[in-house]
Structures are given as structure tokens and as C-alpha cells.
Image (spheres, grey):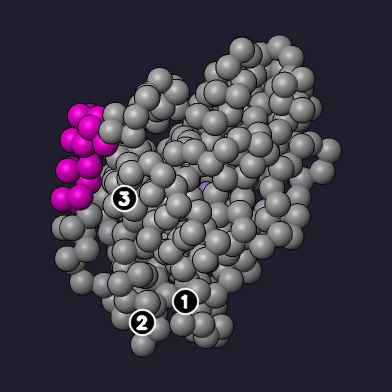
Amino acid sequence: MLKKLNGTGLLIHHWDTDGICSAQLLLKHLGNKNIKNQTPHIGNYFLTEEEINHCSQHDFVIIADMALPEENILKIAKNSKVIIFDHHIQKEIKNIVHHNPVAKGADPNLYPSTSWIINKYLNKPINLFAILGIIGDHEHRIKNNKTFQKIISDFCQKTNLTFEDLLKMVYLLDSNYKIGDKKEVEKTPHILLRIDDASEILNNKQWNRNLTLLTNEIETLLKKPAREINDNIVLKKIDTPYNIISTITRKIAWETGKHTVVINTGFFTDKNQIYVRSNINLEPMIKKGVSLGFKAGGKKEVLGAIVPKDKTDFFVEEILNFLQNNRGV
Ligand SMILES: [Mn+2]
């Protein structure tokens, strides 16, 4: 299907490691085609009118690792052929090519990343980029997934890399979006097309500088106290210009083992970022957020939302009630 695409193409991908590695795999496969890559504005899980119009100037649009709103997709599909590769929870979108096994009801544990899904789709042997997407989305927690723990440890043995090496590569690749460098995010799949060895990722000077800066900021933010709502729920407010809310949420959730809700007031001027990590299915709250007109999305255990400043308290209260009434942990 991909080989048959004609004309000019645009590849829209997520800004994180999984999105970047998915882009690398697709660009490599489509090497002879006229295709450009782009990410949405960092932090936006939707396309602006301008971005949608830009998509429409292309004969085909491929979307990787992003569950963009259905209405965005349907608009683009009026003018261009649309193909989606993804693993986020989303209703299957009809009349386009929506290659998302999770949206079709498959077990998310068997499809831990978009990079994995694309690599399978392309029938390629397991490689660094298919693996990095998985590590990016799950970090050390993938070790609890028996199938993939084996796949990854076999890969490490074969390539003489450690799990820590892979994790470091993820942090380096993710440093660009966290710092807000959209240009570098868009350049990265091309950098990855040129490298011969994983050490070229590990030794990238610019990404290492980013990482030092971010590590300091994250440490400072984590030191400030969080609010214990009850024995099971932690609420943390941060105010940072960096896009590190998912990292902060993960760290707190994995350290405390509790439902974690984080609010960042410093990333957008007129809106707040809300991020939730829990071991109960957050889908009802994602739907609730969307029905309230917010940009909201996520996976089984993750909710991310962008909410106007004056609606934040209300939505956070809804989330806390949901978590209290649906005991997991
Ligand atoms: Mn992903």
C-alpha cells in the first residue's frame, strides 16, 4: 500500500522517541518518494487550521503515533489520501487507512509502540528504531511485559547494548521536544537515517546539553512537595516552560505507586496542561474531557489534556472524583 503512493506526501509524527523512530522507519522505507516530515506544535495533540490546510496541499498524508481528533483527519481526507499508524486508544476511523491494532480491539501489550507496529507492517527484522520506540513509551516498565522483555534482552545481547544505553538514547531523543525545539525534532528522523552506530546517538553534543538542563529542572520540581489527596492519590502543581509534564507524572507515579495528577501552569499562556497516570482505565475521563470541549487524549493508563485556565479546577475535581470512585492501586 505504501509503495503505491503517488505525488507529494507529508508525514506527521509525534515529537517523542516513538514518533521519531516511527518516522525514521517510514522515511527509510519510502526513501524514493517526495515526502516531508513535520510534528504538530509541541504539546498540541491536534492540528491547527493552518496545519490542516498545509496537509491538504499534499497527495498523501501519513500520521504516525498520534491519535489526532477524528474531525482533523476527516478534513484532511477530503483532499488527500490518509494513512494512520498508531497504538493509542481511539475509535477506528472509517474510510481512511487506520492501521491501529489497539483501535481494532487487540491487546495493547502486544503492540507497545507505533515503531513496533510499523516495523511489523514493513516486515523488517527487529532493529534499533523498532526497539527504541518501545523503550520510549514504557521505559523500565516494559520489563514486566514477558514477550517484550525477552525481545529486548535478546536485542541487547546481539548488539552489545545495555538496557541503560537504550534508555539514555530515549532521554536524548526526547530532550528536543522537552526543551521545545520543534525544528530539531523534525530533523532527528533524518539524522537517524544517516547514523551507522548507536554511539552516534549517545554522543550527540547538543542532545546531551539539553539533557543536563532538563535533568536539573526535573530534579528541582520533584523536590517541591506534592499534595496527598488521600492514601491513593497524589496531586502535583508545577510551573515550567518545558514540556516535561509526562516525565514528572511518570516519576511520581512509579515512585509512589499511586494515582498521579499533575498540572503545569507554565507551558501555555492561556491554558494549563493536565496529565494523569493510573492503573485504572482512564478512557471515561478522556471521553469526558473531549465532551467538555478540551483537547484530551491518552492510552489505557494515561490521560493528557489541555484545559483553559479557568476550567482547570473543575476538570481536576472531576478527575479526582473519578479516581476516588474507581479504586485501583
Ligand atoms: Mn507511542
Magenta-tinted stretch: 201-217
Check contact, mark 3 vs mark 2: CB within 8 A: no
Which amino acid type corresponds to the residue marked 3 in the rendered image? Thr
Q: Secondary structure at mark 3?
A: loop
Tell me if residue 44 can be seen. Answer: no
What's the residue type where badge 1 is placed?
Leu
Q: Earlier in the sequence, mark 3 or mark 2?
A: 3
Marks 1 and 2 sit apart, C-alpha to C-alpha, by 8 Å
Q: Of 222 and 160, which appears nearest the observer?
A: 160
Query: Are the residues at dot 3 and dot 1 in contact (C-beta closer than 8 Å)?
Result: no
Q: Mark 2 is on which residue type?
A: Ile
Label 1–label 2 contact, CB within 8 A: yes
Q: Nearer the viewer, residue 325 or 161?
A: 161
- Residue at label 1? 320
- As displayed, is residue 112 above or below residue 40? below
Q: Horizontal and vertical percent for residue 58?
A: 67, 17
Local secondary structure at mark 1: helix
Name the residue tied to disc 3.
162
User: Which residue is disc 2 drawn over?
Assistant: 229
Q: Earlier in the sequence, mark 3 or mark 1?
A: 3
Q: Quadrant of residue 123?
A: top right
Observer-nearest residue: 87 or 312? 87
Position of 15 with respect to 83 (left or right) is left
Q: Is residue 205 left or right of residue 87?
A: left
**On screen, residue 71 above or below 238:** above
The x, y position of residue 243, in whole percent, is 34, 46
